[in-house]
Image (cartoon, rainbow, N blue to C red):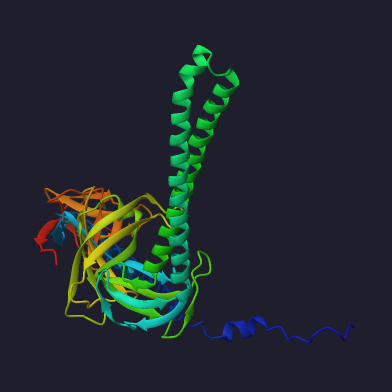
Amino acid sequence: MNFNRPFRIEPTPEDRKNDPAPVRHGRSWIGRIAGVALGLIGTGALASGAWSHYAQYRQTMATAEERRDLVPDVRVTTVEPSDGIDVVNLPATTSAFASANIFARASGYIAKREVDIGDHVKEGQLLAEIVAPELDHQIAQAEATLGQLKSALQQAQANRELAKVTWDRDKPLVEKGWLTAQQGTIDSQTLKAQEAAVSVAQANVVAEDAQLQVLHQQKIYQHVVAPFDGVITQRNIDVGSLVQADATSGTFMFTIMQSNVIRTQVFVPQDAAFGVRPGIDAIVHVPELPDRSFPGKVTRIANAMQPGSRTLLTEIDIPNPDGTLTPGIYCTIELRIPRKTPSFKVSADAIIFNQGGLQVAVVENGVVHLRKINVVRDLGRQVEINSGVKTGDKVILNPSVDLADGSRVTLRTQAVS
């Protein structure tokens, strides 16, 4: 007997007969009903999801169709031509129309000084007087020497006349043989020697006279006068000062500037330089004089660009009769330059900048056309362009990012500000 097997009591046939009949609970019907319900729920969920997706699809298609058929209302402005005059403002510094440093041309001491810094002087007015007694002695000596040389010239002329008379008398006698040929030779050569002596005496007189003129000119230089109308801007001498006349190290006495006309120099950029020519209008503005402007004209140009800066040197003369402007002040020059090439003004709000570069959206017959442009000058709220548009074109202000070439729009005009 195997005691490891589990103990089990088998029912007898009798017991089986006496067992009650099994009770059936209908679980299969409940499962079927649950399955059907779940199926209906799933079908409803799928139908609802499908309907929602279909409704969303229809809404999306309707939105796309509406967007495709939508004609947006845009603000536009009209392209206008730029003015025929290009106004350019450039910085500058005033300078005197003419300026001269006055040096001593005669050596000596300052006896008089008639002017000081800031004095207005006229051409030829005495500025200072130099005294040099030794110069007077040199002049007296030169005059005496000139007198001696003139006397020597007269003596040489008399000797020449005597030699000529002698030769004229002896020449026929020599030809007839009444005088020796030797005597004739002596007479003719004596005449030639006297003529040469006269030439030397004349040259000495001319040389001494020229030297005397130099001394007289130095005497004139003792009176220092103004070379032109102007104002004294520098003074380096006083009464009693010793001055030296020398071409390289002469005494620097005064500086005088002509102030009734003021000159300015400006460097005009290349984009505006091609319209610059003598005679065009220019106006000087000084920050410290905001209520006044000083008109003038371009007087001369360099006719060559500066290689480093690509600018044109331009000089402007400004009348300054009352002396309000002074040399050396900062100012701005307003040049009114005639345009050489046409350009157009467009609102800065119309510019499109994307991968296609700078563009504007031009509307023609309700259709958008994107055109590339070239900006030549930024004026702040407006820009100047020289390509891509023409006068009268309608350009869209603040165009949308999705605006495409060929799109249809309706216009709402806005004037250029």
Q: Residue 123: x, y in percent?
A: 26, 69
Question: Residue placed at 50% from the left, 64% from the top?
Answer: 247
Q: Residue 213: x, y in percent?
A: 40, 58
- Quarter of the figure with residue 397: bottom left
Return the residue nearer the eye: 228 or 210.
Answer: 210
Q: Is residue 357 left or right of residue 66?
A: right
Question: Residue placed at 21% from the left, 49% from the top?
Answer: 342
Q: Is residue 117 left or right of residue 67?
A: right
Question: Residue placed at 50% from the left, 12% from the top?
Answer: 176
Residue 114 against residue 58 in the figure, above or below: below
Residue 276 against residue 323 in the figure, above or below: above
- Quarter of the figure with residue 125: bottom left
Residue 123 against residue 214 in the figure, above or below: below
Q: Quadrant of the C terminus?
A: bottom left
Does residue 308 show up? no
Q: Residue 334: x, y in percent?
A: 24, 66
Return the residue nearer the eye: 401 or 309.
Answer: 309
Q: Residue 84: x, y in percent?
A: 16, 54
Return the residue nearer the eye: 329 or 35.
Answer: 329
In the rendered image, the residue lying farthest to the front is 178
Return the residue nearer the eye: 46 or 248.
Answer: 248
Q: In this view, does 277 lie to the left or right of 136?
A: left
In the rendered image, the residue lying farthest to the top is 176
Q: In which quarter of the image is the N terminus?
A: bottom right
Q: How many labels does the image show?
A: 0
Does residue 238 show up? yes
